[in-house]
Image (cartoon, helix red, strand yellow):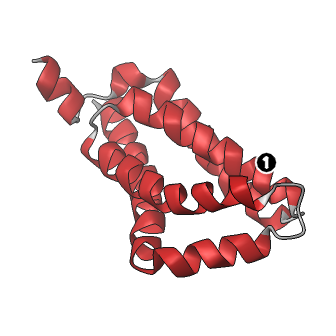
Amino acid sequence: MNTQIAYLILRVAVGVSMLGHGLVRLPKLQGFSAWMLKTFENSLLPEIMVLPFSYALPIAEFVLGILLVLGLFTRISSIVASIVMILLIFGSTLIENWGALVPQFIHVVFFAYLIQHIDRNSFALDTKLRG
């Protein structure tokens, strides 16, 4: 029982982190996109790649956060969230934002744990839907 509760706490915590990131960016999506374009203007990434990512990122963070908090599609949500974080890690290295790497890596570790121990995901909508 304790391992299932610990899993729940970790899943909800990392889900709230993702949800919060998306939630604060969505109302200012255009400003966030402009900031990201400015941040990457001298990087190797062309604007044509940064622009769609800058709009998709807050939406992905918000949706993935909700899914993780609810425990709905937990495995696939954790995999997709890991991919998002890996893309963020790549971007951070291209602009030499070394300080951003630590929290991004921590998120990846949490997502890897959620995937590896998915059998502990007892307190989740996934479990209720499986019946």
Amino acid, disc 1: Phe
Q: Is residue 12 left or right of residue 107?
A: left
Q: Residue furthest left?
A: 131
Looking at the picture, does residue 123 appear above or below residue 44? above
On-image quarter of the C terminus = top left
Residue drawn at (44%, 64%) of the image: 22
Left or right relative to 39: residue 54: left
Residue 15 falls left or right of residue 90: left
Report which quarter residue 72 is drawn in: top left
In this orientation, does residue 64 appear?
yes
Q: Is residue 30 above or below residue 114?
A: below
Label 1 Cα neighbours within 10 Å, binned few <14 / some 14-19 / many ≥20: few
Position of residue 51 measured from the top left corner of the image (x, y, whole percent)? 64, 61
- The residue that disc 1 covers is 90
Residue at coordinates 31% horizontally, 44% vertically from top-left?
A: 67
Label count reads: 1
Q: Which quadrant of the structure image shows residue 76?
A: top left
Q: Is residue 115 above or below residue 32?
A: above
Q: SS of the residue at dot 1?
A: helix
Residue 3 x %, y %: 37, 31
What percent of the width, then of the height, locates residue 58?
Answer: 48, 62
The answer to which of 32 and 47 lies nearer the viewer is: 47
Q: Quadrant of the N terminus?
A: top left
Residue at 59 percent of width and 48 percent of height: 107
Q: Residue 110: where, in percent of width, then height?
A: 55, 41
Q: Residue at x 54, y 32 (%)?
A: 113
